[in-house]
Image: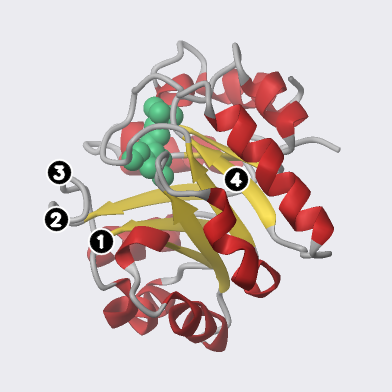
Amino acid sequence: MKPIIAPSLLSADFGNLEKDIQMLNRSEADWIHLDVMDGVFVPNISFGIPVIKAVRRLSEKPLDTHLMIVQPERYIHTFKEAGCDLLTVHWEACTHLHRTITQIKEEDMLAGVALNPHTPIEGLEDIINDLNLVLVMSVNPGFGGQKFIERSLNRISRLRDMIKRNHSEALIEVDGGVGLDNIAAIIKAGADAVVAGNAVFKSSDPEQTIHNLKSA
Ligand code: DX5
Ligand code: ZN
């Protein structure tokens, strides 16, 4: 089984998003990963609804949206209207995580939960059967181009065990510092999908790099 590849638009050319999205449409990318940052949950601010609507018009691929914002439950319907297919909220940002997941699914989107590197994987066990996806952060969220935290491999394996044990259908996606040098180890540890920002967009031939990631 080939991994799901989700290039992150955070590392694309914001002065010419159309060109980069057309490249992604031609490529073997499965999803487009959208990093929404509010400057509160994470120290950085990225982009929001108007940009996502524009991406939706241009993209032929599903939009995998990663909300790095506080109180994400306030915006679930708004992100659905903007055209998101998969909505991932942070464990650390949700007081009523189960309710939020239910609301995402009621809007006919797939529901994901992201875990910061310090958040125990085990905290998900009681809702793992309600999730479509778990996003394992392999860097501290906020910026592209950071170094992969090696301990994430152990976290992916433990999550894979938990998913099996509970007969859950949740996919494991890994985000941060993923590239051609470590994708094989990440998949071997149990990941189904990877996000790649810098590895794709800072390479000399992004379309070829997506192909290489897909066949790694
Ligand atoms: C980080 C974001 C990532 C980021 C990944 O907070 O969630 O999706 O774009 O970028 P790379 O692949 O460059 O580490
Ligand atoms: Zn992300």
Cα distance between the residues tagged 1 and 4: 19 Å
Q: Element at badge 3? A: loop
Tell me the crowding category of disc 3: few under 14, some 14 to 19, or many 20 or more residues within 10 angstroms, Cα based. few
Residue 9 in sight here: no
Q: Which residue is mark 3?
A: 43
Cα distance between the residues tagged 3 and 2: 6 Å
Q: Residue at x 25, y 38 (%)?
A: 14
Q: Earlier in the sequence, mark 1 or mark 4?
A: 1
Name the image colouring: secondary structure
Q: Residue at x 82, y 55 (%)?
A: 164
Looking at the rendering, the quadrant in which ligand 2 lies is: top left
| Quadrant location of the C terminus in the rendered image | top right
- Please tell me which residue lies in front, 17 or 198: 198
Q: Earlier in the sequence, mark 4 or mark 3?
A: 3
Amino acid marked by disc 3:
Pro
Mark 1 in CB contact with mark 4 (< 8 angstroms): no
Q: Tell me the tag on residue 40.
A: 2
- Please tell me which residue lies in front, 110 or 170: 170
Cα distance between the residues tagged 4 and 2: 24 Å
Q: Earlier in the sequence, mark 3 or mark 1?
A: 3
Mark 2 in CB contact with mark 1 (< 8 angstroms): yes
Q: Which residue is mark 4?
A: 173
